Image (cartoon, grey):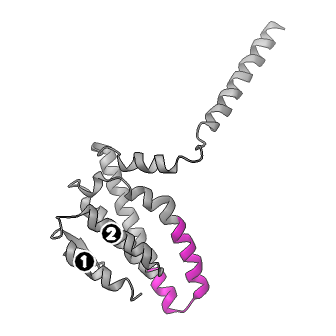
């Protein structure tokens, strides 16, 4: 009888710890602003974490290139339903995955990732332009201008496949914002 109580007590303890472990992953509501602030103030990464961030930025950039090509293809085919579906998906992708990846301030000045960071920001603006969100494109342009102030001669890949100085690419992006 005593062994049975010990066994059931231990089992209860294990189950309770599993439930608490699951509940620990739940995010409290109302912390979005605090999370954004913490991510923006995140310390620069090094070693394996920096290599992982480089891979994440590169993967996101390649994903946006493919999304842009798909959006252009759907527009060329006048597939309004496909455009609407992709638009909804891209909006969610950007808010859940891309924006948190672009939030830290350090990566816009870290020599190993600032090129990827800038290219990704330009690609985001390009996709937003294809989605016909000129206000969000302008916000992205303003963000690039602030983050990269004083580095207008830095080479970026915009449009994809062409390299040009960041200042010139910003001017081109400003002009293209209304043409999509």
Point out the stretch of residues depicted in magenta. 69-92
Residue on which the image places disc 1: 169
Task: Out of 83 and 29, give the one closest to the viewer.
Answer: 29
Helix, strand or loop at label 1? It is: helix
Depth check, mark 1 against mark 2: the one in front is 2
Task: Out of 63 and 83, give the one closest to the viewer.
Answer: 83
Query: Distance of mark 1 from mark 2, alpha carbons?
Result: 13 Å
Q: Position of residue 117 (x, y in %)?
A: 30, 62
Displayed quadrant of residue 13? top right
Q: Position of residue 74 (x, y in %)?
A: 52, 86
Residue on which the image places disc 2: 142
Residue at 61% across / 42% down in the picture? 26
Residue 66 visible in the displayed image? no
Image-based side of 42 in relation to 5, left or right: left
Task: Out of 5 and 20, give the one closest to the viewer.
Answer: 20
Task: Out of 134 and 22, give the one closest to the viewer.
Answer: 134
Residue at 42% across / 80% down in the picture? 129
Residue at 27% across / 68% down in the picture? 145
Q: Residue furthest right?
A: 1
- The secondary structure that most of the magenta stretch takes on is helix
- Name above or below for residue 170 compared with residue 52: below
Q: Position of residue 55 (x, y in %)?
A: 35, 56
**Which quarter of the image is occupied by the C terminus?**
bottom left
Displayed quadrant of residue 6? top right
Q: Is residue 72 magenta?
A: yes
Residue at 44% across / 62% down in the picture? 98
Image-based side of 104 in relation to 77, left or right: left
């Amino acid at each position: 009888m005593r062994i049975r109580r010990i066994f059931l007590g231990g089992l209860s303890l294990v189950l309770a710890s599993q439930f608490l472990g699951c509940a620990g992953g739940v995010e409290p509501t109302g912390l979005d602003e605090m999370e954004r602030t913490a991510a923006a103030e995140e310390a620069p990464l090094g070693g394996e974490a920096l290599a992982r961030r480089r891979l994440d930025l590169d993967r996101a950039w390649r994903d946006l290139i493919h999304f842009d090509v798909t959006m252009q293809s759907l527009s060329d085919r006048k597939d309004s339903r496909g455009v609407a579906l992709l638009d909804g998906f891209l909006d969610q992708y950007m808010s859940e995955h891309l924006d948190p990846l672009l939030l830290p301030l350090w990566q816009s000045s870290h020599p190993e990732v600032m090129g990827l960071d800038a290219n990704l920001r330009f690609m985001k603006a390009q996709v937003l332009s294809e989605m016909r969100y000129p206000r969000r494109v302008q916000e992205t342009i303003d963000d690039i201008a602030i983050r990269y102030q004083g580095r207008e001669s830095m080479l970026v890949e915009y449009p994809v496949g062409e390299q040009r100085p960041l200042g010139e690419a910003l001017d081109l992006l400003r002009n293209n914002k209304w043409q999509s």
